[in-house]
């Protein structure tokens, strides 16, 4: 109670005089608020915003008006030393600093310069040998006695070699030209304005940052804004490259946006979703024509025979439903092949066998490999002529026929062209890559099982299968649930495997939902329809994950 009284008294005493720094912040917040209102007014008058229609600029204008209201609202609160307004001001000013820094980097060509620097480093790669040579000299110097002449000289030579290598590499990569371009860019008004905004945002945020005592800041409040500042870079990245594109795709899903040309999108409300999800069902005989019983432009996607009749499902967009069914089959096969195998592998890795650390690393390696590289390797393995898989099958069949006198025919499996096999080919490759990750997660769950419980079950006479089924599996249920959810979500988003593995194939057997989304958006230029497909897929993933959570909550070992 006494501490609270002291904080209040200190806050009231410090509030007797408004500092020049705080006056600067108040003026700056007013300027920013006016700037946001001006930007909102300009956006409201825009008729063609990157060919996205008038909705997007007006939505951004409303967002700017809301931010301006926040800025104006903080002015009287800061004047009265309200610490909540101070925290809002800190976060807002440093967020503005981050955006101004990104804009400044763009205006001076920093990002293009980084590409040029990377290209220069690649072209001058032999010069990078100067760093290991210099480090080797420093390492050798540490073998001598401290403060001895050989040690000092070798360290100086080693550091000099590394510094010289760095200077030469930067010079050869065009650093001098980049510096000249940077200096000359400061003659432009937009660059100077971005730099000034960057500096003022930083100054205002720093002023508020250092006036915690005047605002009566508590330790918990200080920890709060420090945590938010640590999260700020990721928050900026989330807003610019995830949240805003997400909102844009949601808007486009209600339009006929093409993505090319100068024609703005038309707002067609739910037409994309209606076209995608439209289904008809009819019971017909073999002599009857399906088109007489379903709506126009609906085509058969499934048929169930019921004696002399058949229940037929027809869809307005049969490819979407085909892709959805292919995705579900892919997920089921992936779960069957990857999770039991990963669990068996985790049980082996959990055993007290020499060299297990090495095998754990080896089995995990496929999980960190790039999907494109993995797909190219499996594309070679699946090759019907030179692939090792068919070569091994042919050798096995030949050996069995010659040893046992059988007459087994070599199947000569067309892994990448047979529509009945293509999905299985992709699943085998994906399971091979994800098994290592699942095994490591399951291994962590197995190592968390109390040894005392397993020992007590053994003493009570439970055999290995009983211990596994009655004790081990229930105790690792949370881990198994996590692995199942992540594997299922990964399967529902399958795209790269199909795209790279089957190359230029036009077969619909490779058509997953994400692949279909890609075709609609980037091959047929129906961005609005592709956006609607993405949101339907999101809804499917959300519902399936929610069902899994509901089912898992009934698991006693998990809920406890």
Image (spheres, helix red, strand yellow):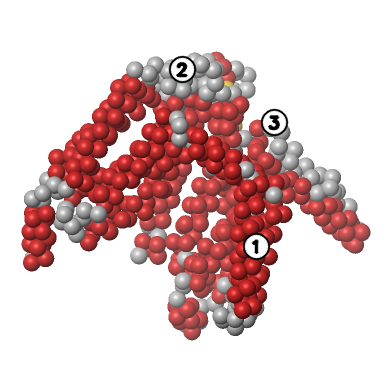
Crowd tier of the residue under label 2, counting other residues whose Cα lies within 10 Å: few below 14, some 14–19, many 20 or above: many
Judged left or right of residue 19, residue 402 is right
Instruction: Name the N-terminal-most of marks 2 and 3.
Output: 2
Q: Secondary structure at mark 3?
A: loop
Looking at the rendered structure, the number of numbered marks drawn on it comes to: 3
Judged left or right of residue 71, residue 524 is right
What residue do we see at 32% from left, 42% from top?
201
Measured in 3D between alpha carbons, the distance from the residue under mark 1 to the one under mark 2, in whole angstroms, is: 59 Å
Q: Tag on residue 264?
A: 2
- Residue 536 pos. (x, y %): 46, 34
The residue nearer to you, when weighing 446 against 527, is 527
What residue do we see at 51% from left, 26% from top?
527
Q: Is residue 88 above or below residue 505?
A: below
The residue nearer to you, when weighing 262 against 205, is 205
Instruction: Name the N-terminal-most of marks 1 and 2.
Output: 1
What residue do we see at 45% from left, 45% from top?
544
Task: Work out which quarter of the rendered image holds the C terminus and state it.
Answer: bottom left
The residue nearer to you, when weighing 211 against 529, is 211
Q: Tag on residue 506?
A: 3
Tag nearer the camera, 2 or 3: 2
Measured in 3D between alpha carbons, the distance from the residue under mark 2 to the one under mark 3, in whole angstroms, is: 31 Å
- Residue 8 pos. (x, y %): 9, 58
Q: Secondary structure at mark 1?
A: helix
Dot 1 corresponds to which residue?
161
């Amino acid at each position: 109670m006494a501490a609270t009284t002291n904080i209040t008294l200190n806050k009231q005493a410090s509030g007797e005089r408004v500092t020049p720094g705080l006056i600067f912040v108040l003026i700056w917040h007013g300027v920013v608020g006016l700037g946001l209102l001006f930007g909102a007014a300009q956006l409201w008058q825009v008729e063609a915003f990157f060919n996205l229609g008038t909705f997007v600029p007006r939505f951004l204008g409303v967002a700017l008006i809301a931010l301006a209201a926040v800025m104006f609202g903080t002015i009287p609160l800061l004047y009265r030393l309200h610490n909540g307004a101070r925290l809002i001001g800190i976060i807002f000013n440093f967020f503005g600093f981050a955006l101004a820094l990104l804009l400044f980097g763009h205006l001076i060509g920093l990002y293009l310069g980084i590409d040029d620097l990377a290209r220069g480093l690649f072209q001058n790669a032999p010069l990078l040998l100067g760093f290991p040579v210099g480090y080797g000299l420093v390492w050798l110097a540490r073998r001598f006695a401290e403060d001895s002449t050989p040690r000092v000289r070798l360290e100086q030579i080693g550091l000099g070699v590394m510094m010289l290598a760095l200077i030469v590499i930067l010079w050869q990569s065009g650093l001098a030209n980049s510096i000249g371009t940077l200096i000359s860019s400061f003659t432009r008004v937009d660059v100077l304005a971005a730099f000034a905004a960057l500096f003022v945002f930083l100054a205002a945020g720093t002023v508020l940052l250092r006036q915690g005592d005047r605002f009566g800041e508590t330790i918990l409040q200080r920890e709060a804004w420090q945590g938010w500042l640590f999260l700020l870079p990721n928050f900026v990245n989330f807003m610019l490259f995830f949240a805003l594109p997400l909102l844009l795709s949601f808007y486009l899903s209600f339009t006929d946006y093409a993505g090319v040309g100068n024609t703005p999108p038309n707002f067609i409300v739910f037409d994309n979703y209606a076209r995608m999800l439209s289904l008809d069902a009819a019971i017909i005989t073999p002599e009857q024509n399906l088109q007489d019983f379903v709506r126009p432009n609906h085509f058969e996607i499934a048929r169930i025979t019921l004696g002399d009749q058949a229940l037929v499902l027809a869809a307005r967009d049969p490819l979407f439903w085909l892709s959805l069914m292919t995705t579900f089959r892919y997920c089921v096969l992936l779960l069957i092949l990857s999770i039991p195998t990963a669990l068996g592998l985790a049980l082996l890795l959990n055993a007290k066998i020499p060299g297990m650390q090495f095998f754990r690393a080896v089995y995990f390696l496929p999980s960190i490999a790039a999907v494109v590289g993995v797909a190219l390797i499996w594309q070679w393995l699946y090759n019907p002529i030179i692939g090792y898989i068919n070569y091994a099958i042919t050798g096995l069949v030949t050996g069995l026929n010659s040893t046992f006198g059988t007459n087994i025919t070599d199947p000569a499996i067309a892994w990448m062209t047979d529509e009945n096999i293509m999905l299985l080919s992709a699943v085998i490759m994906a399971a091979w890559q994800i098994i290592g990750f699942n095994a490591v997660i399951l291994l962590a769950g197995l190592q968390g099982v109390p040894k005392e419980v397993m020992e007590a079950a053994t003493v009570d006479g439970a055999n290995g299968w009983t211990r596994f089924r009655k004790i081990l599996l229930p105790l690792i249920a949370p881990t198994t649930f996590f692995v199942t959810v992540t594997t299922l979500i990964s399967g529902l988003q399958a795209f790269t495997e199909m795209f790279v593995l089957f190359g230029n194939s036009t077969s619909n057997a490779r058509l997953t939902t994400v692949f279909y989304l890609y075709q609609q958006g980037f091959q047929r230029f129906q961005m609005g329809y592709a956006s609607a497909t993405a949101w339907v897929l999101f809804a499917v993933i959300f519902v399936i994950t929610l069902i899994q959570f509901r089912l898992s909550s009934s698991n006693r070992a998990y809920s406890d």
